[in-house]
Image (tube, rainbow, N blue to C red):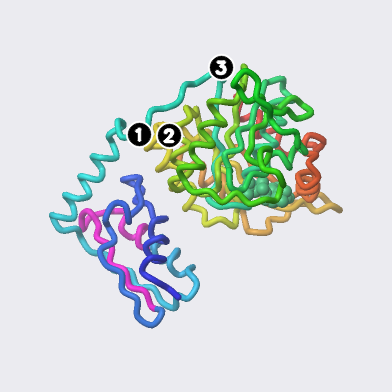
Amino acid sequence: MITKESVFETLKNVVDPELGMDIVTLGMVREIAIVDENVRVVIALTSDKCPLGERIKGDAERLLKGLAGVRGVTIDLSVMTEDERNRLLQILKEKKQPSQLPEKLPKKSIKRLIAILSGKGGVGKSSVTAMLAVGLAEKGFKVGILDADITGPSIPKIFGVIEAPFVLEGKIIPPQSKKGIKIMSMNLLIPEEDAPVIWRGPLVSSAIKQFYMDVDWGELDYLLIDLPPGTSDAQLTVLQMIPVDGIIVVTSPQELAGMIVGKAVQMSKMLAVPILGVVENMSYVKCPNCNYDINLFGTSNGLTLAQKINTKFLGSLPIDPLLSKACDEGKIEGYDIKYFKPVVELLIK
Ligand code: ADP
């Protein structure tokens, strides 16, 4: 059943492109009414000349129509009262105060820290992280992966690493893959690979902090951080703590395009960390007979998305059964990353 809460949650994905924040946080959602599965929302704009009003309305309409149990959607645009506008100004002012962010942990002996982000699970974020690590290692870089997806860790499985880390002189020594990639993950600490980790926010962030601070990463050229899927507080906490140099966004064509990108931009602005590029995964299928690219989900929109947010389009990757087989069998290092090599090249350029 559709509730006001689910409508609010959905509207959190509508970003005011000019202000770079979602319309719920900005206090622009003035009213929600639900009658017989019909949703009516009143959105208050900052001014009646707001050029982005129609776009905000369109985004809200499209997302709400996608909610299960919704029959009809009406979005009425209105203009903020003076009180509403003052509250919005206050919110924007608070957002600009960097002192509210927790202090960043030190950089350690790591040249570049890159976080890999996706809007939802299953788009191939971990596979992309793993291929990136392999690509960089093959180029001679020293690489580590911090699997920050504490409740759904999959990096060790992809690499076939089962060795538990050990403690030496108070430091955690991470196991290494065949190509020498250092890996730290919750999966290496739990007795059974499939045991669920049911932890809440603060525990998760302290585990990640430990994975970063207490692990002896040694000297690294790249530490890749496989973030948990999504763009809420969990990801923000990691990005606030760890001194990342940049974010890579992984999307798939099925993902509601603007959503993850809008949120990633918002995060990047809040944290003053650049988005290094967008990778579109599972973009097409190569016909095994004639090598023709079949766009299962229509034409790729990765390039448009990247351009929209002024970042590099690092490339689109096909759905490749050999990749999922390699990941399932823990043999990513034996997989030919030919489709992925251009991504590595573009990133290190
Ligand atoms: P996420 O980290 O976003 O949850 P994963 O990297 O774990 O996603 O990928 C989800 C599943 O999809 C895995 O089984 C993985 O092997 C498979 N997969 C990811 N990318 C591809 C691809 N390009 N082609 C085929 N299978 C893929």
The image position of residue 176, as x and y in percent, is 73, 27
The image position of residue 116, as x and y in percent, is 57, 38
Q: Could one spot residue 282 in this view of the protein?
A: no
Residue at 80% of width from left, 53% of height from top? 287
On residue 152, which mark appears? none
Residue assigned mark 1: 101
Residue at 45% of width from left, 32% of height from top? 241
The residue closer to the viewer here, 2 or 289, is 2
Task: Report helix, strand or loop for mark 2.
Answer: helix
Mark positioned earlier in the residue sequence (3 or 2): 3
Examine the rendered structure and indicate whether residue 77 appears above or below residue 137. below
Mark positioned earlier in the residue sequence (1 or 2): 1
Whole-Å distance between the Cαs marked 1 and 2? Answer: 7 Å
What is the residue that sits farthest to the bottom in this orientation? 36
Specify the amino acid type for callout 1: Leu
Task: Report helix, strand or loop for mark 3.
Answer: loop
The residue closer to the viewer here, 132 or 168, is 168
Magenta residue check for 191? no
Q: Is 215 on the left-hand or right-hand side of 319?
A: left
Examine the rendered structure and indicate whether residue 68 appears above or below residue 338. below
The residue closer to the viewer here, 107 or 285, is 107
Graded by Cα atoms within 10 Å as few (under 14), some (14 to 19) or many (20 or more), the crowding at tag 2 reads: some
